[in-house]
Image (cartoon, rainbow, N blue to C red):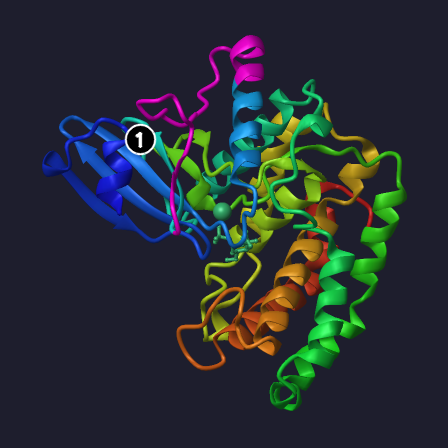
Amino acid sequence: MLQEVLSEYGFDFKHLNIETINNGLINKTWLVHNGSNSYILQKINHHIFKDPDAIAFNVRKIDNYLKQHHPNYLFVAPVKTLVQQEMKYIDKDGYYRLLPFVHNSKTIKTVATTEQAYEAAKKFGEFTMLLSGFPAEELKITLPDFHNLSLRYNQFCEALINGNTERIPPAEDAINFIRQNKNIVEEYERILKNKSFKKRVTHHDTKISNVLFSAEDKGICVIDLDTVMPGYFISDVGDMFRTYLSPASEEEKDFSKIEIREDYFKAIWDGYMSEMNGVLTDEEKAHFIYAGKFMIYMQAMRFLTDHLNNDSYYGASYSNHNFIRACNQITLLKSLMEKENDLCKIIGLPLL
Ligand code: GN1
Ligand code: MG
């Protein structure tokens, strides 16, 4: 299959060196070396991204805008096929796209220093800031209701009724925790009605491996633009909290390793605000810490829902995998809530 795809770009398969990269739960990725040039090949999971053309449309629009308004910004647009297509569709298989590999760049799997957290937050902030003059509503919705917390809550309630009922009793504590913290959904519903919250060009997947770094750990640019859509800043800041604050990832089974590192929190604030301070409204800024609660709660709920639905979305590589992931995220959320007061003081915000 890869041979068929890569021939569309005029590559001679015999001369290619292909490595598989595993960096996400949804799409498949390869690193392709063709002599001195390297590329990233991605297969879009079209069961989830049902309209891959919407992704290509958004990337093209943003690319054009940035070329015109911020020509020095490094934006990684896809390489076109020999017949000038941005993606290659292989019948009964799916959509592939090829991106140039940015020279002298590296990706990081887990945040190891506060500088890395600062740089990543700055890069995601810069992306939204540079596009603050771009009409976000012109972008297509590549994943409908992706961060719609009310809908995620309803899906959770539905899984309790129509899911695997045998999985409910052992998950009772987690289920109760989600129910007891429904105020996080209610706050989200207030945000929807709040005119001070702006729909901005939002990345929606701000994990550290979506930033390219230089050898000196300076942020170069953001990548993986499938979920770039109009959204609220809490999605981007919240997912940084979720994935940078704890030294242990969502896959960690030993929950004693989960903690909220205050210096990393400060680094996210400093990095993001170095770009977004003049863009965000006061009301948005006041929700900075809420962003973390919003995203961690949503992810805990999505993993738990998937567990109740027999792992149909995320899959599972061991028994109870999504249940463990959900409990991991609940532990993280509890630690964040315990520290909320201290975190407010660090950035000089009143408790919401
Ligand atoms: C999925 O595939 P990946 O890892 O980039 C998911 C995110 C979750 C993440 C949790 C389209 O992202 O929302 O936060 O897993 N993306 C989609 O690891 O569902
Ligand atoms: Mg992604």
Disc 1 within 8 angstroms of ligand 2 (CB): no
Magenta residues span 64-92
Q: Secondary structure at mark 1?
A: loop
Q: Is residue 133 left or right of residue 33?
A: right
Q: Is residue 107 visible?
A: no
> Is the residue 53 above or below the residue 192 in the image?
above
Q: Is residue 67 magenta?
A: yes
> Is the residue 171 above or below the residue 266 in the image?
below
Residue furthest to the front: 91
Q: Position of residue 83 (x, y in %)?
A: 35, 22
Image quarter of residue 15? top left
Q: Is residue 254 left or right of residue 21?
A: right
Q: Position of residue 294 (x, y in %)?
A: 71, 55
How many labels, in total? 1
10 Å crowding of disc 1: few (<14), some (14-19), many (20+): some
Q: Is residue 77 left or right of residue 233?
A: left
> Is the residue 7 above or below the residue 318 in the image?
above
Q: Which residue is mark 1?
A: 101
Main structural element of the magenta stretch: helix, strand or loop? loop
Q: Position of residue 236 (x, y in %)?
A: 62, 42
Q: Is residue 236 visible?
A: yes
Name the residue: 54% across, 65% down: 313
Q: Position of residue 199 (x, y in %)?
A: 75, 34
Name the residue: 70% across, 44% down: 234
Q: Amino acid at mark 1?
A: Phe
Q: Nearer the viewer, residue 269 or 280?
A: 280
Name the residue: 21% across, 42% down: 3
Residue furthest to the left: 14
Q: Is residue 65 magenta?
A: yes
